[in-house]
Amino acid sequence: MRTRLRNAREAVHQLSPLFSYGFWGKGHRRVLTNVTFYATNLCDSRCIHCGFWQQRPVLHLSPEVFQRVHDSPATDIDTVFGFEGGEFPLHPQADEILEIFRGRKIELYANGLKPELTKALVRKHSIPHLILSLDGRKETYRKIRGVDGFDRVTALAAEMARETLVSISYTLSPWNDLDDFQFVRQFCQRHGITFGLNILHNATFFHPDFDYSEQALSPEEFQMQPIPFAAEEHFQGDHPVKLDYFLGYNEWLRGNLHVPCTSIFHRIVVFANGDIPLCQKGDFGILGNLYEQSLEEIWWSRETLARQKRRIRCNACWISFHRYDDLFMYRAMKTLLPERWIRFWMKHAKGRAPS
Protein backbone atom coordinates (compact mmCIF):
# COMPACT_ATOMS: atom_id res chain seq x y z
CA MET A 1 0.00 0.00 0.00
CA ARG A 2 2.81 2.38 0.93
CA THR A 3 4.57 1.60 -2.33
CA ARG A 4 1.41 2.38 -4.31
CA LEU A 5 0.95 5.69 -2.50
CA ARG A 6 4.59 6.59 -3.06
CA ASN A 7 4.29 5.74 -6.77
CA ALA A 8 1.07 7.74 -7.05
CA ARG A 9 2.67 10.80 -5.41
CA GLU A 10 5.61 10.52 -7.80
CA ALA A 11 3.25 10.27 -10.78
CA VAL A 12 1.30 13.34 -9.66
CA HIS A 13 4.60 15.20 -9.30
CA GLN A 14 5.62 14.16 -12.82
CA LEU A 15 2.26 15.16 -14.31
CA SER A 16 1.82 18.42 -12.38
CA PRO A 17 3.89 20.50 -14.85
CA LEU A 18 1.19 19.85 -17.44
CA PHE A 19 -0.91 22.49 -15.68
CA SER A 20 1.77 25.16 -16.16
CA TYR A 21 2.55 23.90 -19.68
CA GLY A 22 -1.04 24.61 -20.69
CA PHE A 23 -1.94 20.99 -21.41
CA TRP A 24 -4.64 21.56 -18.81
CA GLY A 25 -5.82 25.06 -18.00
CA LYS A 26 -4.75 28.34 -19.56
CA GLY A 27 -1.00 28.00 -19.10
CA HIS A 28 -0.22 31.66 -18.34
CA ARG A 29 3.49 32.63 -18.43
CA ARG A 30 4.60 29.15 -19.40
CA VAL A 31 8.25 28.20 -19.01
CA LEU A 32 9.98 26.00 -21.56
CA THR A 33 11.83 22.88 -20.46
CA ASN A 34 13.86 22.61 -23.68
CA VAL A 35 14.92 24.98 -26.42
CA THR A 36 16.94 23.35 -29.20
CA PHE A 37 18.58 25.60 -31.78
CA TYR A 38 19.27 24.45 -35.32
CA ALA A 39 21.69 27.32 -35.30
CA THR A 40 23.20 26.85 -38.75
CA ASN A 41 22.54 24.71 -41.81
CA LEU A 42 26.27 24.54 -42.57
CA CYS A 43 27.47 20.94 -42.29
CA ASP A 44 30.55 18.94 -43.28
CA SER A 45 28.82 15.54 -43.30
CA ARG A 46 27.23 14.16 -46.46
CA CYS A 47 24.51 12.06 -44.85
CA ILE A 48 22.26 10.06 -47.16
CA HIS A 49 19.29 10.52 -44.81
CA CYS A 50 19.57 14.28 -44.33
CA GLY A 51 19.79 17.20 -46.73
CA PHE A 52 21.00 19.92 -44.37
CA TRP A 53 24.40 19.93 -46.05
CA GLN A 54 22.76 20.65 -49.42
CA GLN A 55 20.68 23.62 -48.25
CA ARG A 56 21.45 27.03 -49.70
CA PRO A 57 21.82 29.79 -48.81
CA VAL A 58 23.86 29.02 -45.70
CA LEU A 59 22.15 30.55 -42.65
CA HIS A 60 23.52 31.31 -39.18
CA LEU A 61 21.27 32.31 -36.29
CA SER A 62 22.65 35.55 -34.82
CA PRO A 63 24.12 35.86 -31.29
CA GLU A 64 21.57 38.63 -30.58
CA VAL A 65 18.74 36.11 -30.94
CA PHE A 66 20.52 33.71 -28.57
CA GLN A 67 20.97 36.49 -26.02
CA ARG A 68 17.28 37.39 -26.09
CA VAL A 69 16.28 33.75 -25.64
CA HIS A 70 18.73 33.40 -22.76
CA ASP A 71 17.22 36.44 -21.06
CA SER A 72 13.59 35.56 -21.80
CA PRO A 73 11.22 34.90 -18.87
CA ALA A 74 9.88 32.01 -20.96
CA THR A 75 13.04 30.12 -19.86
CA ASP A 76 14.54 29.59 -16.42
CA ILE A 77 17.48 27.88 -14.69
CA ASP A 78 16.00 24.45 -15.41
CA THR A 79 15.55 25.00 -19.15
CA VAL A 80 17.86 22.80 -21.24
CA PHE A 81 19.37 24.48 -24.30
CA GLY A 82 20.44 22.28 -27.19
CA PHE A 83 22.90 23.51 -29.84
CA GLU A 84 22.68 21.71 -33.17
CA GLY A 85 23.07 22.38 -36.86
CA GLY A 86 23.87 21.41 -39.48
CA GLU A 87 27.05 21.28 -37.46
CA PHE A 88 26.97 23.79 -34.61
CA PRO A 89 30.78 23.98 -34.07
CA LEU A 90 31.01 25.35 -37.65
CA HIS A 91 28.85 28.37 -36.74
CA PRO A 92 31.27 31.30 -37.12
CA GLN A 93 30.17 32.70 -33.73
CA ALA A 94 29.88 29.41 -31.84
CA ASP A 95 32.30 30.66 -29.14
CA GLU A 96 30.34 33.84 -28.52
CA ILE A 97 27.03 31.97 -28.39
CA LEU A 98 28.19 29.34 -25.92
CA GLU A 99 29.67 32.03 -23.69
CA ILE A 100 26.19 33.60 -23.42
CA PHE A 101 24.88 30.35 -21.93
CA ARG A 102 27.74 29.65 -19.56
CA GLY A 103 26.38 28.17 -16.35
CA ARG A 104 23.08 27.09 -17.94
CA LYS A 105 22.05 23.55 -18.83
CA ILE A 106 23.62 22.94 -22.24
CA GLU A 107 23.64 20.05 -24.70
CA LEU A 108 26.16 20.42 -27.52
CA TYR A 109 25.53 18.24 -30.57
CA ALA A 110 28.41 17.50 -32.93
CA ASN A 111 29.23 15.06 -35.70
CA GLY A 112 32.83 14.79 -34.46
CA LEU A 113 34.47 15.41 -37.83
CA LYS A 114 36.36 18.39 -36.39
CA PRO A 115 37.48 16.78 -33.11
CA GLU A 116 39.97 19.49 -32.08
CA LEU A 117 37.37 22.23 -32.59
CA THR A 118 34.77 20.27 -30.61
CA LYS A 119 37.18 19.54 -27.75
CA ALA A 120 38.16 23.20 -27.58
CA LEU A 121 34.52 24.30 -27.30
CA VAL A 122 33.70 21.71 -24.64
CA ARG A 123 36.72 22.60 -22.52
CA LYS A 124 36.55 26.37 -22.90
CA HIS A 125 32.84 26.58 -22.07
CA SER A 126 32.64 23.69 -19.58
CA ILE A 127 29.96 21.95 -21.64
CA PRO A 128 28.13 19.53 -19.31
CA HIS A 129 26.77 17.26 -22.05
CA LEU A 130 28.28 16.42 -25.44
CA ILE A 131 26.18 14.41 -27.92
CA LEU A 132 27.93 12.74 -30.86
CA SER A 133 26.51 10.84 -33.83
CA LEU A 134 27.51 7.24 -34.55
CA ASP A 135 25.26 5.02 -36.66
CA GLY A 136 27.18 1.76 -36.77
CA ARG A 137 30.45 0.08 -37.64
CA LYS A 138 33.12 1.68 -39.81
CA GLU A 139 31.74 0.75 -43.24
CA THR A 140 28.17 1.48 -42.17
CA TYR A 141 29.25 4.88 -40.89
CA ARG A 142 30.94 5.73 -44.18
CA LYS A 143 27.89 4.64 -46.18
CA ILE A 144 25.39 6.63 -44.10
CA ARG A 145 27.47 9.71 -43.34
CA GLY A 146 29.13 9.94 -46.74
CA VAL A 147 32.57 10.65 -45.23
CA ASP A 148 35.30 8.59 -43.58
CA GLY A 149 34.96 9.90 -40.03
CA PHE A 150 34.49 6.77 -37.91
CA ASP A 151 37.93 6.82 -36.27
CA ARG A 152 37.69 10.53 -35.44
CA VAL A 153 34.25 10.17 -33.86
CA THR A 154 35.03 7.10 -31.75
CA ALA A 155 38.34 8.55 -30.54
CA LEU A 156 36.66 11.85 -29.63
CA ALA A 157 33.86 10.08 -27.77
CA ALA A 158 36.24 7.90 -25.76
CA GLU A 159 38.48 10.85 -24.84
CA MET A 160 35.73 13.29 -23.89
CA ALA A 161 33.89 10.65 -21.83
CA ARG A 162 36.72 11.01 -19.33
CA GLU A 163 35.99 14.74 -18.97
CA THR A 164 32.25 15.28 -19.30
CA LEU A 165 28.95 13.50 -19.90
CA VAL A 166 28.95 12.07 -23.42
CA SER A 167 26.04 10.52 -25.27
CA ILE A 168 26.03 8.73 -28.60
CA SER A 169 23.07 9.46 -30.85
CA TYR A 170 22.39 6.29 -32.82
CA THR A 171 19.81 6.56 -35.60
CA LEU A 172 18.06 3.37 -36.69
CA SER A 173 17.55 3.45 -40.46
CA PRO A 174 17.24 1.14 -43.47
CA TRP A 175 21.04 1.35 -43.87
CA ASN A 176 22.14 -0.16 -40.55
CA ASP A 177 21.25 -3.43 -38.86
CA LEU A 178 21.26 -5.36 -35.59
CA ASP A 179 25.05 -5.83 -35.72
CA ASP A 180 25.53 -2.07 -36.00
CA PHE A 181 23.03 -1.49 -33.19
CA GLN A 182 24.82 -3.90 -30.86
CA PHE A 183 28.26 -2.60 -31.84
CA VAL A 184 27.39 0.97 -30.85
CA ARG A 185 25.69 -0.14 -27.61
CA GLN A 186 28.76 -2.17 -26.64
CA PHE A 187 31.07 0.73 -27.52
CA CYS A 188 29.05 2.96 -25.19
CA GLN A 189 29.14 0.39 -22.39
CA ARG A 190 32.92 0.04 -22.64
CA HIS A 191 33.52 3.77 -22.35
CA GLY A 192 30.80 4.80 -19.89
CA ILE A 193 28.86 6.65 -22.59
CA THR A 194 25.08 7.05 -22.69
CA PHE A 195 23.45 5.26 -25.61
CA GLY A 196 20.82 7.48 -27.23
CA LEU A 197 18.38 5.92 -29.65
CA ASN A 198 16.68 7.72 -32.54
CA ILE A 199 14.65 6.23 -35.36
CA LEU A 200 14.84 7.73 -38.84
CA HIS A 201 11.82 10.01 -39.03
CA ASN A 202 9.75 12.05 -41.41
CA ALA A 203 10.68 15.60 -40.42
CA THR A 204 10.53 17.41 -43.73
CA PHE A 205 12.76 20.31 -42.69
CA PHE A 206 15.78 17.97 -42.72
CA HIS A 207 15.52 17.48 -46.47
CA PRO A 208 13.02 19.86 -48.11
CA ASP A 209 15.05 20.09 -51.34
CA PHE A 210 17.05 16.89 -51.10
CA ASP A 211 18.82 15.90 -54.32
CA TYR A 212 18.28 12.14 -54.35
CA SER A 213 20.16 11.68 -57.61
CA GLU A 214 23.43 12.78 -56.03
CA GLN A 215 23.23 9.84 -53.60
CA ALA A 216 21.83 7.36 -56.17
CA LEU A 217 18.86 6.84 -53.85
CA SER A 218 15.17 6.90 -54.60
CA PRO A 219 12.56 8.74 -52.53
CA GLU A 220 11.05 5.35 -51.70
CA GLU A 221 14.19 4.41 -49.75
CA PHE A 222 13.45 7.28 -47.38
CA GLN A 223 10.06 5.88 -46.39
CA MET A 224 9.88 4.73 -42.79
CA GLN A 225 10.21 0.97 -42.42
CA PRO A 226 9.54 -1.46 -39.56
CA ILE A 227 12.45 -2.44 -37.33
CA PRO A 228 13.11 -6.14 -38.08
CA PHE A 229 14.77 -6.80 -34.71
CA ALA A 230 12.40 -4.87 -32.43
CA ALA A 231 12.40 -7.26 -29.48
CA GLU A 232 13.09 -6.73 -25.79
CA GLU A 233 15.96 -9.23 -25.86
CA HIS A 234 17.95 -6.81 -28.04
CA PHE A 235 17.57 -3.81 -25.74
CA GLN A 236 17.91 -4.92 -22.13
CA GLY A 237 19.25 -2.96 -19.19
CA ASP A 238 18.41 0.53 -20.44
CA HIS A 239 15.86 3.15 -19.42
CA PRO A 240 12.29 1.78 -19.72
CA VAL A 241 11.15 4.77 -21.80
CA LYS A 242 13.84 3.96 -24.37
CA LEU A 243 12.45 0.43 -24.50
CA ASP A 244 8.93 1.83 -24.97
CA TYR A 245 10.23 3.97 -27.82
CA PHE A 246 12.08 1.05 -29.43
CA LEU A 247 9.27 -1.50 -29.12
CA GLY A 248 6.44 0.94 -29.79
CA TYR A 249 7.68 2.11 -33.18
CA ASN A 250 6.49 -0.85 -35.24
CA GLU A 251 3.07 -0.76 -33.56
CA TRP A 252 2.80 2.97 -34.22
CA LEU A 253 3.86 2.49 -37.84
CA ARG A 254 1.08 -0.08 -38.30
CA GLY A 255 -1.45 2.36 -36.85
CA ASN A 256 -1.98 0.33 -33.67
CA LEU A 257 -0.52 2.82 -31.19
CA HIS A 258 -1.69 6.35 -30.39
CA VAL A 259 0.25 8.45 -27.88
CA PRO A 260 -0.99 11.94 -26.90
CA CYS A 261 1.33 14.73 -27.97
CA THR A 262 2.20 16.58 -24.74
CA SER A 263 5.79 17.59 -25.53
CA ILE A 264 4.78 20.46 -27.85
CA PHE A 265 3.50 22.25 -24.72
CA HIS A 266 6.99 22.71 -23.30
CA ARG A 267 9.67 21.91 -25.92
CA ILE A 268 10.58 23.87 -29.04
CA VAL A 269 13.13 23.96 -31.82
CA VAL A 270 14.43 27.12 -33.48
CA PHE A 271 15.51 27.09 -37.11
CA ALA A 272 18.52 28.97 -38.45
CA ASN A 273 16.23 31.63 -39.95
CA GLY A 274 14.66 32.32 -36.55
CA ASP A 275 11.41 30.41 -37.14
CA ILE A 276 9.83 28.41 -34.32
CA PRO A 277 7.65 25.61 -35.75
CA LEU A 278 4.78 24.07 -33.82
CA CYS A 279 6.84 20.87 -33.59
CA GLN A 280 10.08 19.41 -34.88
CA LYS A 281 8.31 17.61 -37.71
CA GLY A 282 7.78 21.04 -39.22
CA ASP A 283 4.56 20.31 -41.13
CA PHE A 284 2.07 22.23 -39.01
CA GLY A 285 3.08 25.83 -39.43
CA ILE A 286 5.28 28.42 -37.72
CA LEU A 287 4.43 29.89 -34.30
CA GLY A 288 6.58 32.96 -34.88
CA ASN A 289 10.02 34.25 -35.78
CA LEU A 290 12.62 35.39 -33.23
CA TYR A 291 13.88 38.16 -35.51
CA GLU A 292 10.37 39.66 -35.42
CA GLN A 293 9.08 38.85 -31.91
CA SER A 294 10.48 37.99 -28.50
CA LEU A 295 10.31 34.39 -27.30
CA GLU A 296 7.75 35.24 -24.62
CA GLU A 297 5.55 37.08 -27.11
CA ILE A 298 5.44 33.94 -29.23
CA TRP A 299 5.25 31.41 -26.43
CA TRP A 300 2.70 33.16 -24.23
CA SER A 301 0.33 34.09 -27.04
CA ARG A 302 -3.21 32.71 -26.97
CA GLU A 303 -2.85 31.63 -30.58
CA THR A 304 0.18 29.45 -29.76
CA LEU A 305 -1.66 27.70 -26.94
CA ALA A 306 -4.77 27.24 -29.08
CA ARG A 307 -2.73 25.67 -31.88
CA GLN A 308 -1.04 23.31 -29.44
CA LYS A 309 -4.37 22.20 -27.99
CA ARG A 310 -5.68 21.50 -31.48
CA ARG A 311 -2.74 19.11 -32.09
CA ILE A 312 -2.88 17.29 -28.75
CA ARG A 313 -4.05 14.08 -30.36
CA CYS A 314 -1.65 14.28 -33.27
CA ASN A 315 -0.02 10.94 -33.94
CA ALA A 316 1.93 11.86 -37.07
CA CYS A 317 5.50 11.15 -35.94
CA TRP A 318 7.75 8.99 -33.83
CA ILE A 319 10.45 11.65 -33.49
CA SER A 320 12.56 11.05 -30.38
CA PHE A 321 12.65 14.77 -29.50
CA HIS A 322 8.91 14.56 -28.84
CA ARG A 323 8.07 10.92 -28.27
CA TYR A 324 10.46 10.23 -25.39
CA ASP A 325 8.72 12.92 -23.38
CA ASP A 326 5.25 11.79 -24.48
CA LEU A 327 6.02 8.21 -23.42
CA PHE A 328 7.41 9.42 -20.09
CA MET A 329 4.11 11.17 -19.41
CA TYR A 330 2.24 8.06 -20.50
CA ARG A 331 4.16 6.00 -17.95
CA ALA A 332 3.25 8.50 -15.24
CA MET A 333 -0.43 8.32 -16.22
CA LYS A 334 -0.25 4.53 -16.00
CA THR A 335 0.46 4.82 -12.29
CA LEU A 336 -2.79 6.71 -11.69
CA LEU A 337 -5.15 5.11 -14.21
CA PRO A 338 -5.80 1.52 -15.32
CA GLU A 339 -3.63 0.81 -18.34
CA ARG A 340 -6.59 -0.51 -20.32
CA TRP A 341 -8.22 2.94 -20.06
CA ILE A 342 -5.11 4.67 -21.35
CA ARG A 343 -4.57 2.08 -24.08
CA PHE A 344 -8.19 2.43 -25.18
CA TRP A 345 -7.82 6.21 -25.43
CA MET A 346 -4.50 5.88 -27.28
CA LYS A 347 -5.90 3.39 -29.76
CA HIS A 348 -9.20 5.14 -30.43
CA ALA A 349 -8.13 8.78 -30.19
CA LYS A 350 -8.73 10.70 -33.38
CA GLY A 351 -5.03 11.10 -34.12
CA ARG A 352 -3.38 11.75 -37.46
CA ALA A 353 -2.03 8.56 -38.99
CA PRO A 354 1.68 8.17 -39.76
CA SER A 355 2.65 9.73 -43.07
Image (spheres, grey):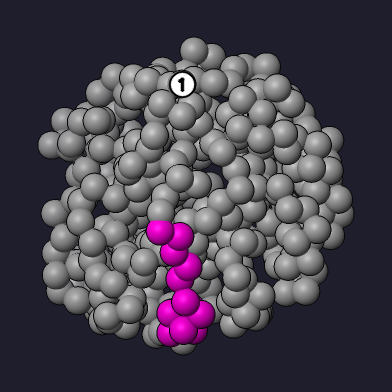
**Disc 1 marks which residue?**
216
Q: Which segment did they paint magenta?
A: 57-70
Q: Position of residue 211 (x, y in %)?
A: 39, 34
Q: Position of residue 298 (x, y in %)?
A: 26, 75
Residue 132 part of the magenta-drawn span: no
Residue in the foreground of this view, choosing between 142 and 243: 142
- Above or below — where is 149 with respect to 77? above
Q: Is residue 106 left or right of residue 49?
A: right
- As shown in the figure, which amino acid type bears the numbered disc 1? Ala
Residue in the foreground of this view, choosing between 94 and 301: 94
Q: Callout 1: few (<14), some (14-19), or many (20+) C-alpha neighbours within 10 Å? A: few
| Residue at the image point whose x is 50% and y is 71% from the top | 79
| Residue at the image point whose x is 65% and y is 23% from the top | 140
- Above or below — where is 50 with respect to 35? above
Considering every residue shown, the one lying at the far top of the view is 228
Q: Quadrant of residue 190?
A: top right
Visible residue check, residue 107: no
